[in-house]
Image: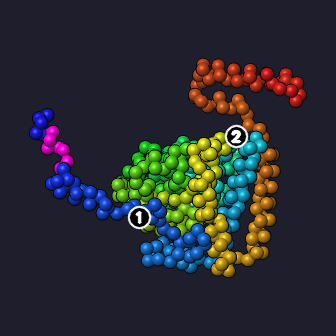
Amino acid sequence: MTVESTAARKPRSSSTGGGKRAASAKKAAPQKSTEPELVQLLTPEGKRVKSAKNAVYDAYVAGITSEELRGLYRDMVLTRRFDAEATSLQRQGELGLWASLLGQEAAQIGSGRATRDDDYVFPTYREHGVAWCRGVDPTNLLGMFRGVNNGGWDPNSNNFHLYTIVIGSQTLHATGYAMGVAKDGADSAVIAYFGDGASSQGDVAESFTFSAVYNAPVVFFCQNNQWAISEPTEKQTRVPLYQRAQGYGFPGVRVDGNDVLAVLAVTKWALERARTGEGPALIEAFTYRMGAHTTSDDPSKYRNDDERVAWEAKDPILRLRAFLESEGHADEGFFAELDDESEALGKRVREVVRAMPDPDLMAIFENVYADGHALVDEERAQFAAYQASFADAPAGGEVK
């Protein structure tokens, strides 16, 4: 490289005026807002939002009744009660693991209630509220986490697929299914759930590509709860997640994931356009995971209390309750009756789980290889010997 070419690459000095213009342009650049732009129909204080910007979505809940509003509230309360009971059962040793949905009730109930019976749902492993909306008995969700079955329900009975532990793969399953729906000429839609962490997986990118090219009737519903286990969203993307849809040729919308009305409206909009042949859409439900990623996680190691407290002020259940009370959609009798129903649900969940059989610990070695494997046989024998060592331990004594 010559001296001349090197000099040519240097920025002009301020004496030429170029530096001043650059500095002036930098100062004039608009400041980015710290608040995300999103669709919101209920404020955190429970006030109804009416704006021209949200008119297209507002129309989908314009005629909602008091009974339907109470139903959404009931769904969220009972889902949270079930989730809390499952967490407690895991702490008591009745479940091996549990993935809590605490804080994400509005995202799940709003979107779940937007589906039709003939739509098909592909969940991850945290969509307990969506399962509730699809009519899956809550106790059926717990068998897998206890280790006594591989799912616990027939997917075709409720058009609700089994929970998917492999991160992001369900979006490909949903896309393929939706392509089949289109080929069959049906007017139903498919919805696939995933988290902000899964959005970084190649499976999700591939599903976006295939769904766009084949104009598949699928809605991608991303619950951005701000943390992919211990990794914050800003470490995964430089643009808001919903904007990724633009690169694939279909619309993306960010919705307040703690606003059940907004989620219901936006999901209805996306499902309707999918059913009528307009192709896929991406919904980013901007919400927050109030608890741990799973019961094996300790969120205090990577996030501070101030963040959690700020999001607790946006609690989806308290938000809707404030709206119900202020607008006269529910009275104290309704809330008291729901409290009793909530406790009854918790009691039933405890009884059902404790009546489940203990898992067969040796079953983990079955079906690993079709024809067996020497290493698996060796591991099975070692584990069997380890388990047998507990049989001779004195009652109440410590196993050495």
The quarter of the picture where residue 137 lies is bottom right
Q: Position of residue 156 (x, y in %)?
A: 60, 54
- Per the image, label 2 sits on a secondary structure element best described as loop
- Dot 1 corresponds to which residue? 277
Q: Position of residue 292 (x, y in %)?
A: 63, 48
Q: Going by the image, does 181 lie left or right of 92?
A: left
| 314 is higher (above) or lower (below) than 203 | below
Element at label 1: loop
In the image, residue 302 sits, relative to residue 338, either above or below, namely above
Where is mark 2, residue-wise? 96
Q: Where is residue 112 in the image (x, y as percent from the top left)?
A: 58, 62
Instruction: Determine which quarter of the picture holds residue 25.
Output: bottom left
For mark 1, does the 10 Å Cα neighbourhood hold few (<14), some (14 to 19), or many (20 or more) residues? some
Q: Is residue 297 magenta?
A: no
Residue at 83% across, 26% down: 398
Three-letter amino acid code at the position of disc 1 = Gly
